[in-house]
Image (cartoon, rainbow, N blue to C red):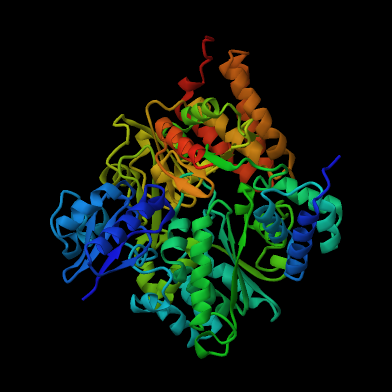
Amino acid sequence: MNTPLTPNESETLGRIVADLKGRPGPLLEVLHAIQAALGYVPPAAVPVVADGLNLSRAEVHGVVTFYHYFRHTAPGKHTVSLCRAEACQSMGAEALAEHAKRRLGVDFHQMTADGQFSLEPVYCLGNCACSPAAMIDGRLVGRVTPERFDELIAERGRKQ
Amino acid sequence: MTVTVYVPRDAGALSLGAGEVAEAIAREAAARGLEMRLVRNGSRGLYWLEPLVEIQTAAGRIAYGPVTPGDVPGLFSGGFLTGGAHPLSLGPTESIPWLASQQRLTFARVGIVDPTSVADYISHGGYQGLRNALSMSPEAIVQAVTDSGLRGRGGAAFPTGIKWKTVLEQSPQQKYVTCNADEGDSGTFSDRMLMEGDPLTLIEGMTIAGIAVGATQGYIYLRAEYPHAYRALNSAIAAAYQARYLGGDVMGSGKRFELEVRLGAGAYICGEETSMLESLEGKRGEVRVRPPLPAIKGLFGRPTIVNNVVTLSTVPTILDRGAEFYKNYGMGKSRGTLPLQLAGNIKRGGLVERAFGVTLREILYDYGGGSASGRPIRTVQVGGPLGAYIPASQFDTAIDYEALTGIGALLGHGGIVVFDDTVDMAQMARYAMEFCAIESCGKCTPCRIGSTRGVEVIDRILGGVESERNVKLLEDLCETMLQGSLCGLGGMTPFPVQSALKHFRDDFRPRTRN
């Protein structure tokens, strides 16, 4: 069963749908706004969005699950995205990914047991002349060596 | 006079510490009681020198790089605010040979202007193209674009003017101009650099397109992986509205053009134009069957221009300086210039805009300086994850749509990813299939199923399971995907695989197990 929305989440959702429903082709905009506010798109949000935009649940579910960017579960406190595309591979992205998985003790699409870090793959961050690239909480980082990766993780570990 | 200091806000420069350098410079200037104006420009595209800081002097801009925050006090002590000597000094920016030998038309202002300032844009020649367009008939604007020889820079290389003409010829109704900014190909970043470094050029190009075909609404479909470009575009759009270059009365002409940015959500397939339109409508990004063409029935079923960022951003130059001027660059049927992106294992990576006709070898060695690792370059992949791998024996090929097609490759969006001799080409072929499996929209079988089978077949080859038979099967599978897929994702994924098989067959030998 889906976890029901909290009253706060319901209110946020209602406001987002009301604000955006009049725009042309609003569904992606609505989902982006939900993820920006809540960190993910809770499965329980699907019927609410469907109702608000006059779509079927299947249509909304279909869109949420089509796009890699939309999360179905709450993310860790910090989201670490590692580029897996060719330019980064040419500079050691595969080895970096293995290192990151070992360092955090998780695989891609997983969250560390303490809820601090989510590790996600990404297919190109557009920083291909400074490979390998990573994005941490929206901050782009270039030429990421395993040592640099450990520093970045340690910096965030300290700030909690 | 207050000195102007430029520190890029380009995402690539920020990824190497430009933000911290800008803070250090502001702090140091304040501590020393020195007055200066800090402008956050785009990147000049010399990424091995980023963060690249520039100082405006009477003799032009002087560059320093790569600068770290720790270098900043020393730079001030060396008098860098007056262009003083320092080990990090690169001299006048425009004289750096890597930059001086380029032919920057589309990128003329990137790294030079303040991306948020309409006034700065205009003082560097901006909005001349739109001014001219407003005094021309729609047919004449479209004719100029056709005459320039401009072809779609997103990768398909379709003549831009022909597309526009089709939209213009549809009966008056709501029409749209959409910009495909879903730059998902690995090894490409020209769209990103342009949107961050000179977003008003894209805005001007889209406005000209709207005026030309009678479209009053524009959308920029931007990938979610580009948060910096999102902010840069939104602030430039707000500035353009403020200065009445967008809105109900563009430049006092009485003509309307509205523009907004819509975010994608991490689907590579949405770079395919019909899939992008579905996504803009808020749907799953599944490919549409053509016909009808988007120019006839596009966004919300209306006539729609779909062009790439670089294509639209080249239009202002054409309308400003004339079709003839632009057409005089290039070779054969590839007219004008192309902003190439040099990426991956390369010593001096970045943005090289040159007229078509320059060879791969010149780009890789004269500009790139060879591999970053110092090992021999074994292959380059041109045109993103659907582009062929080109062996070193073909590096004398010219950058030209037809020349690359002639060797079984493609130019695509102009990204060049460099690999040294440690690359395992069977793994790269496997990755091509894996990527297609992850990104397939699922609508057609050859792409949806073929890509997964492709990974399995390559695994069997490398695992020593009937390797010869499975190589044959892989070749057959490539042919099926190539002929039977609905769009370029399934239809072109075979290119990297086939080229790896053709040029690097030895890499497909069964591996000995550990």
| Percent x, y of residue B392 | 36, 34
Observer able to see residue B473: no
Above or below for B354 versus B436: below
For the C terminus of chain A, the quadrant is: top right
- Seen at 46% across and 71% down, the residue is B200
Q: As rendered, which of B145 and B383 lies closer to the eye?
A: B383
Observer able to see residue B258: yes
* Occupied quadrant, residue B469: top right
Q: As rendered, which of B197 and B142 lies closer to the eye?
A: B197
Question: In the drawing, does residue B175 fall left or right of residue A56?
Answer: left
| Percent x, y of residue B432 | 56, 35
Numbered label tally: 0
Above or below for B277 versus A157: below
| Percent x, y of residue B401 | 45, 52
- Seen at 68% across and 61% down, the residue is B280
- Seen at 42% across and 66% down, the residue is B198
Above or below for A101 versus B272: above
- Seen at 64% across and 77% down, the residue is B169
* Occupied quadrant, residue B291: bottom right
Q: As rendered, which of A91 and A8 lies closer to the eye?
A: A8
Question: In the drawing, does residue A92 fall left or right of residue B427?
Answer: left
For the N terminus of chain A, the quadrant is: top right
| Percent x, y of residue B378 | 37, 31
